[in-house]
Structures are given as C-alpha cells and as structure tokens.
Amino acid sequence: MSITGGAGDEHVTYPGNYSEVIAVSAIDVSLNRYERSNYGEANEICAPGVDIYSITPSEGRKYESGTFFAAPLVSSTIGLMLSANLPQDIREILQDTSQDIGVNGKDIFFGNGLLNASAALSSSLSPETITTITVSESSTTTNFLLIFLIVNYRIRIIYYFLFL
C-alpha cells in the first residue's frame, strides 16, 4: 500500500505505481479529489485526506491535507483485516466493498471508490462474529464495530472506530 503522490499530476508515483501495491488517493469531505492528489490508472482506492486534525512536533495541533493522511486509513483497515486472518484477497475485498464515487466504475481519480472500512472488515466474516453498537452522547453518534474472533483457541477483540 502506498500513496498516489502529492503534486496533483496525472501520474501515480512509485512505489504506488507497481502492480503489487495498492495506490491510495485523497478526497475531501464533499467527496471531491484533493487538488494535490496524484491520479492515474494505478490509483485503486481513495480515503479522506483533507483537513485531517493532526499533531506535529513543532507546530502542535493543526489541520493537514494530503495523500499521506489518506493512506493510514487504508493501511489500518488492511492491518485489521490481516489480524483477523481473513482468507480472501485483501485487494479484492477493498475493491468490492468501496463506495463508487465519480464516474461509474473504476476511474483515474478515485480508483474503485471510497474506502468502506466497516464493509471491508465484515464482508468475509460470519454474521455471528460481528456486533454493532451505536452509542449516542448528546448530538454526537459514534458507531463502534466490535469484531470478536476466536483464533488459535483464544479470543481476539478488535475495536474499529467509525465516525459517521
């Protein structure tokens, strides 16, 4: 997994341009391509990457934008999928569960579409291993997807926070 690049060019940078790598582009809250996100045929999936609240060593808290902020959302989803020992192809699951945006089907700006971490994690798990709980606190609703897996005779609990 790698970024598409951050110059806004029609060229996915390496290593994202290798066929073995899943290239990630960035979008904003309105589902528009981030202007500095590179694009091209190798782009496979997009994730939010604009105005991401961050902490920097020198400047403290601030909002940042770029493909470097979209990529961790995809890599953390892949990490959770791998920790669940999913038997299916990670790339195929991400493609099949992404939300198509832009023109119909895969395109050079959004790839197969917007990452849907919840669908990617739950797509190949049996229904009895998934419990979804909605917790409301004042006007904010946070969905917690709790996936309980029994692997090697022990229980693993994976918490994945989805802010909807």
Image (cartoon, rainbow, N blue to C red):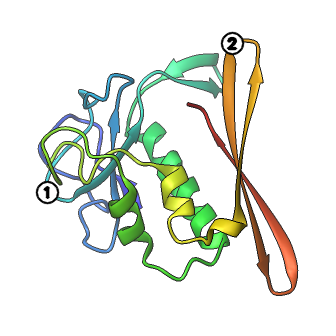
Q: Residues within 10 Å of mark 1 (few under 14, many from 20)?
A: some
Q: CA distance from mark 2 to mark 1?
A: 41 Å
* Mark drawn on residue 139: 2
Q: Residue at x 34, y 46 (%)?
A: 99
Query: Residue tagged by mark 1?
Result: 41
Q: Nearer the viewer, mark 2 or mark 1?
A: 2
Q: Position of residue 54 (x, y in %)?
A: 60, 26
Q: Identify which amino acid the numbered label 2 is placed on.
A: Ser
**Secondary structure under the numbered disc 1 in the rendered image:** loop
Left or right? Give the position of 32 relative to 141: left
**Secondary structure under the numbered disc 2 in the rendered image:** loop
- On the question of residue 59 being in view, the answer is no
Q: Position of residue 91 (x, y in %)?
A: 38, 69
Q: Residue at x 63, y 26 (%)?
A: 56
Q: Position of residue 152 (x, y in %)?
A: 81, 87
- Farthest residue to the bottom: give it: 152
Note whether 15 is above or below 83 in the view shown: above
Left or right? Give the position of 94 relative to 125: left
Q: Residue at x 56, y 61 (%)?
A: 121
